[in-house]
Image: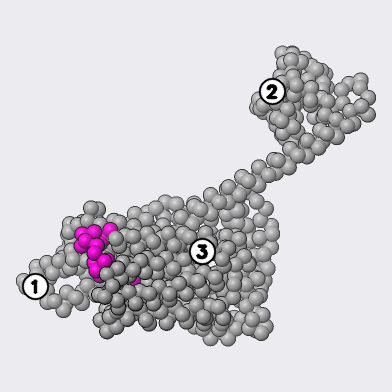
Amino acid sequence: MFRGININHLANGHFKGARRKGGASTPPGSLGAAAERGQVGLCPGPERTVLRACGGSVFGPSWGDVLGLSRPRSELLFNLGAAGREGWRRNCSPMPGRDPRATAAPRAAGEGGLGAALQHRKMLAEEGAVQTRARVLLLTVCAAGVGGTFQFGYNLSIVNAPTLHIQDFFNTTWRLRTGGPLPGHLLLLLWSLTVALYPVGGLCGALLAGPMAIKLGRKKSLLVNNVFVVAAATLFGFSRKAGSFEMVLLGRVLVGVSAGVSMNIQPMYLGESAPKELRGAVAMTPAIFTALGILMGQVVGLREFLGGPQAWPLLLASCLVPSMLQLASLPFLPESPRYLLIDRGDARASQAALQRLRGALDVAGEMAELEQERAACGGRRTLRPWELLRDPAQRRQVLSLLVLGSAMELSGNDSVYAYASSVFSEAGVPEGKIQYAILGTGSCELLATVLSCVMIEKAGRRGLLIGGYSLMACWAGIFTAALCLKGAVPWMPYLAVSCIFAFILSFGIGPAGVTGILATELFDQPARPAAYMISGALMWTALFLVGVGLPFIMESLSNFLYMPFLGVCVCAAIYTGLFLPETKGKTFLEISEELHRCRGGQRPTQS
């Protein structure tokens, strides 16, 4: 019975019990005749699935107004076939004048069908929540990545294609100012600055990322970071018209600052927002976007696109496009729930952000975990980098961060790209086709990082790091042998080419992505921004040193160039196997407790 209407009576045209909204009875009419013909049945939400299973279809909530019922109680009305109406009468409600005991078994069957229907509805609701969670999480990853580490890879690679054109611009500008050509050593100095100022800006951005993440939050820091890109793109775009190579140099500093900020904050933001069962895969996406940026920079820099002598200002200024995409999408996505709760103390905003990230699923359990993590932090304030370095309780994590972060930059992957052109040339690749062969190296790293993203939750962090560094050491040895024997054995140049692709694949599967997760998973909330500042400063310093020192290493070691890199890879694999804990599938609190046990019960310093 619902407000005086029995389903059987409704189906038989008995409307005397029906009440209007004001309480008056509804006289029988055309609706009763329709019910008699088996066209109308009334039920609330739980029973509607049973009716639908019997052949019912939704008419709409407006019929409740005709009957004088309030909308919440007359949510849906169904069009039932004769068989469906009879099934409902037999299984779900006793008919007038019939012994209720005669319908006990059918009613039990009807109740069983109702339970199954409710279970089905629950499953559908959970599936919808999972789809919503996947959609929001994917949008968050893409919005953060396109203006984050994508910019790092893109601006790292686009400067290679217009090298000669930019140097001609430097020479022409100098001639217009002084009336004479630019001396060769000054031209080399200006070009070296153009390349080297990018990691210098990155170092400044890495040191700036920690305070920004604390003061502005993760999401807002990524948005504000686009100011540097817009300013740099403006300088690049108008540099030739203004006749100023200083604008190019300043623009390289600014895109470096932007890359330094995003390289630290993007993995922090994504790692804190992802569910623990997907945290590894989500935290791998910055490496995917880096590889994608490198590949896109190589493609756009082709002569057929923006690699010509007149288009290089547009090529350098094209970094504005991903920046605009991020500004158009990221504001509509949630902030890191951990930042909102632990750093800001805003439980309501944290729960709202968590519900948006997880869809309609119950987030009470995850909120409880966040509260436990907040309690474990003990009200400590956010650490500064020098305080983290002095904290004896965090020494093991800091050491792992320094060792493995240095190993990634000193493993020789950057020298592979530098050596690729000469190896391809010796392998017989025509000079005009080498740029397309180099595209294969960028595609190879992108493929490897995608594979690593898929494998990380199965193989674990330690497994990918040990396997990646071991394979890199193997390929480095074979590559050295191939370079030494290339004059004696005709097919050795082809083996060297194969080693280049195999080395890049091994780097992408292991160190390229997993190393960036360490600062997120090995440190608790108060120490995490400082850890990213340390790792970022280390990465950009190593990148600068490798860029400056690589030409001298290549000249002095020649075919044995990769022997130092082989040693670095072996040491990194051994260190990972001995000292790095596995963090796969664990909450941040569980990781913190495991590290606490490993250091003999010593807690982080209270500040």
Look at the picture and state if 90 lies above or below 595. Answer: above
Q: Are marks 3 and 2 in contact (CB under 8 Å)?
A: no
Q: Is residue 118 left or right of residue 205?
A: right
- Residue under numbered circle 3: 283
- Give the position of the C terminus as an image quadrant: bottom right
Distance Cα–Cα, label 1 vs label 2:
88 Å
Q: Mark 3 or mark 2: which is in front?
A: 3
Residue placed at 41% from the left, 57% from the top?
146
Look at the picture and state if 309 lies above or below 257. Answer: above
Query: Which x, y percent locates residue 193?
Result: 25, 74
- Residue under numbered circle 1: 181
- Residue under numbered circle 2: 79
Query: Which x, y percent locates residue 256?
Result: 34, 69
Residue placed at 58% from the left, 51% from the top?
133
Q: Is residue 577 left or right of residue 316?
A: right
Distance Cα–Cα, label 3 vs label 2:
50 Å
Judged from the image, the secondary structure of the residue bearing numbered disc 2 is: strand
